[in-house]
């Protein structure tokens, strides 16, 4: 069973994703800011990290770098609303090696398909 880390400050969204992903057969850990993400990454390995681009104590670039430093084989999904500010950030992080981007509100079947693809990628 693959383990997924969700880093997002929206508690309702995290609760919803936790339920959907658990029903999909994943183990899920939550972090609501960069500091919590650091703690989660220090204590466990994850197959996929889902990273919100706008956090109260930073942005997705910092968390992406933390994930890569902790385990370069962890797959990454960037989560964001569509906006000019985040679109350019998402493009840069995708160019730096992030695996996918999902836009809020999520299409749940599409999100699950993306996660299944990433979990089953070699490496």
Image (cartoon, rainbow, N blue to C red):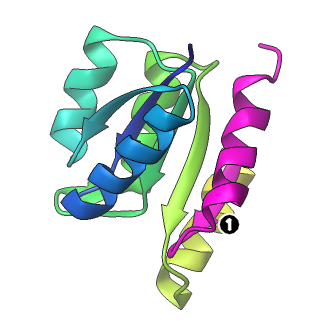
**Which residue range is magenta in the image?**
99-123
Q: Horizontal and vertical percent for residue 87?
A: 59, 77
Q: Horizontal and vertical percent for residue 116?
A: 73, 34
Label 1, residues with CA under 10 Å away: few <14, some 14-19, many ≥20: few
Determine which quarter of the picture holds residue 103: bottom right
Q: Is residue 11 left or right of residue 41?
A: left
Residue 53, compared with residue 49, is above or below; it is below
Asked whether the viewer can see residue 62, the reply is yes
- Residue named by callout 1: 91
Pick whichever, 94 or 106, lies toward us.
Answer: 106
Pick whichever, 16 or 88, lies toward us.
Answer: 16
In reply to whether residue 56 is colored magenta, the answer given is no
Q: Is residue 63 left or right of residue 90?
A: left
- Which residue occupies 73% across, 53% down? 95
Residue 57, compared with residue 96, is above or below; it is below
- Which residue occupies 52% across, 27% down? 68
- Which residue occupies 35% across, 11% down? 44
Determine which quarter of the picture holds residue 75: top right
Q: Horizontal and vertical percent for residue 12?
A: 24, 62
């Amino acid at each position: 069973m693959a383990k997924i880390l969700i880093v997002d400050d929206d508690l309702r969204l995290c609760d919803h994703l936790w339920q959907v992903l658990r029903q999909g057969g994943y183990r899920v850990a939550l972090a609501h800011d960069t500091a919590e993400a650091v703690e989660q990454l220090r204590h466990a390995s994850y197959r996929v990290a889902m990273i919100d681009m706008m956090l109260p104590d930073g942005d997705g670039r910092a968390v992406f770098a933390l994930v890569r430093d902790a385990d370069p084989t962890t797959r990454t999904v960037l989560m964001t609303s569509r906006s000019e500010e985040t679109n350019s950030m998402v493009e840069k992080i995708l160019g730096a090696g992030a695996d996918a981007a999902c836009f809020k509100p999520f299409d749940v079947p599409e999100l699950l398909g993306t996660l299944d693809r990433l979990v089953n990628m070699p490496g």
